[in-house]
Image (cartoon, rainbow, N blue to C red):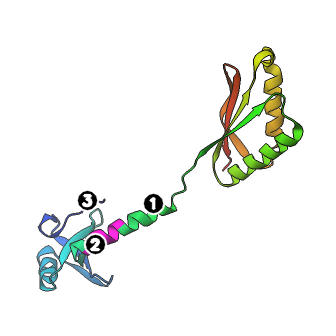
Amino acid sequence: MLKVRLNLQIRATEVRVITEDGQQLGIMPLKKAMELANENGLDLIEVAPNAQPPVCKIIDYAKFKYQQKKAESEAKKKVKKTEVKTIWLSTRISTHDMEVKGKKIDEFLTEGDIVRIELRMRGREQAFPDLARQQLENFLKMLKHAFRVDMPMKRMGGTFSLTIAPSK
């Protein structure tokens, strides 16, 4: 939550005053603004301390805190969380299975997710890393959605791995 100054914590000599409903009262000395707030039984809250002169709002502090909290929760709802999805391949995968997995990756990329593609090699397959690398390159050529490579292809034991993300 944003740290704000209220009432006697405000340091400026002159302030621009706004009422609870957004009506501007203009620039006035801090004492006069404090008197206005006290007459209405409300608080004087500094909402824009860096402005010249600082902007203060006459509002109940509890109501102001509630509005701030509500605005923060709305902002959190609008943030898209990107996930890392993982797709497993093998060197013996059929072309149809590759197409199905390719469609799924295209779906993930349109949703804005990051995709890790891993190709496992088992047993004797590990003697032919070039075959696995070629399989991954062919798979990337099949994808229809535009992407960028986040982490280039690397080998970790018997697994080739690379990470792609939607291009901007």
Q: Under tag 2, what secondary structure?
A: helix
Estimate how packed mark 1 is, as few (under 14), some (14 to 19) or many (20 or more) residues with alpha carbons within 10 Å. few
**Image coordinates for residue 130, horizontal then vertical, percent:** 81, 20
Tell us which disc is closer to us: 2 or 1.
1
Type of amino acid at the residue the image marks with label 3: Lys
Q: Total marks drawn?
A: 3
Alpha carbons under labels 3 and 1: distance apart:
19 Å
Q: Under tag 3, what secondary structure?
A: loop
Identified at 78% across, 32% down, the residue is 136
Q: Main secondary structure of the magenta part?
A: helix
Dividing the picture into quarters, in which one does residue 94 lie? Answer: top right
Range covered by the magenta-colored residues: 63-69
Residue 64's disc is 2
Residue 146's disc is none
Type of amino acid at the residue the image marks with label 1: Lys
| In this view, 36 is above or below 86 | below
Left or right placement of residue 140 versus residue 3 in this view:
right
The tag earlier along the polypeptide, 3 or 1, is 3
Estimate how packed mark 3 is, as few (under 14), some (14 to 19) or many (20 or more) residues with alpha carbons within 10 Å. few
Alpha carbons under labels 2 and 3: distance apart:
12 Å
**Image coordinates for residue 33, horizontal then vertical, percent:** 16, 78
User: Which residue corresponds to mark 3?
Assistant: 3
Type of amino acid at the residue the image marks with label 2: Phe
Alpha carbons under labels 2 and 1: distance apart:
19 Å
